[in-house]
Image (spheres, rainbow, N blue to C red):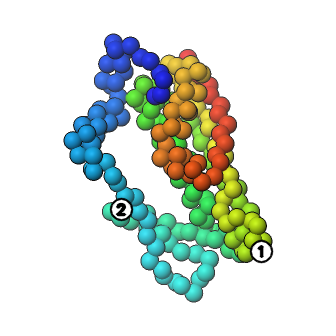
Amino acid sequence: MPNQKLSTKNTKSVYDTSIVYQRHLVLNEKYLKDPASAWITDSAEIIGKNLHDPFRTLVSINDKMKVPFKIGVHKAVGGDHDFPNPGDLLCATLASCFESTIRMISNKLRIELIETKIKVNAQVDVRGTLMMDKSVPVGFQSMHIDAFIMAKNTNEKILHKLIEGAKLSCIIYQTIKKGIPITINSDVKTKN
């Protein structure tokens, strides 16, 4: 966690019980010896079927698992929006990466999470993609995260730092924010 100081005595006891810390320790050693092994490739693939249907497809997520996922087209651009659309997947990607980053940092610091809720919204003016107005950019113009965390054995200041740490460590957040602004509203609570 950025800028959080733990004493050596506390650090050892906190980290000794963290599965995330133990796994990161092994990975850190591996990546120090072989930096090239730190490069990964995530994937998704669509092999077009039912090409007569312009509003639905099936994407396979991950080369090894090939998890099938039905995709639809948003009604704002003529689809039926009967399945998640690519914008929904973009929001899901950011929400899942952000929440899992919070979980891993919490585990490392032995913060006992009681509840998390991450909601992501993305805003786009679809006139650009429909080529109605050349001044309207094609692409999402902004995204917003509502983050709620409730945890034990900590305080609200630490939980706000946890969210800041997630912003710094979340790969999807850091990737998307280079292209569009992402605002965040955080609500944290502690429970004793």
The reply to whether residue 139 is visible in this rendering is yes
Residue marked by disc 2 = 65
Instruction: Give the SS element for disc 1.
Output: loop
- Give the residue displayed 70% in from the left and 64% down from the top: 137
134 horizontally vs 157: left or right: right
Q: Residue 101's x, y, as percent?
A: 47, 39
76 horizontally vs 85: left or right: right
Going by the picture, which residue comes out furthest to the bottom? 52
Decide which of tag 2 and tag 1 comes sooner along the chain: 2
Q: Is residue 44 above or below residue 52?
A: above
User: Where does the C terminus fall, quadrant-wise?
Assistant: top right
Q: Quadrant of residue 88?
A: bottom right
Dot 1 amino acid type: Met
Q: Is residue 43 above or below residue 101?
A: below
Residue marked by disc 1 = 132
- Give the residue displayed 51% in from the left and 37% down from the top: 168
Q: Report the disc number at residue 143.
A: none
Q: Tell us which disc is closer to us: 2 or 1.
A: 1
Dot 2 amino acid type: Met
The reply to whether residue 96 is visible in this rendering is no
Q: Residue 78's x, y, as percent?
A: 71, 75
- Name the one closer to the observer, 92 or 36: 36
Query: Total marks drawn?
Result: 2
- Give the residue displayed 21% in from the left and 41% down from the top: 33
Instruction: Give the SS element for disc 2.
Output: loop
- Give the residue displayed 35% in from the left and 54% down from the top: 40
Q: Is residue 33 above or below residue 152?
A: below
Q: Residue 46's x, y, as percent?
A: 46, 73
Disc 1: CA contacts within 10 A as few (<14), some (14-19) or many (>=20) = few
Q: Residue 165's x, y, as percent?
A: 51, 33
Q: Quadrant of residue 6?
A: top left
Disc 2: CA contacts within 10 A as few (<14), some (14-19) or many (>=20) = few
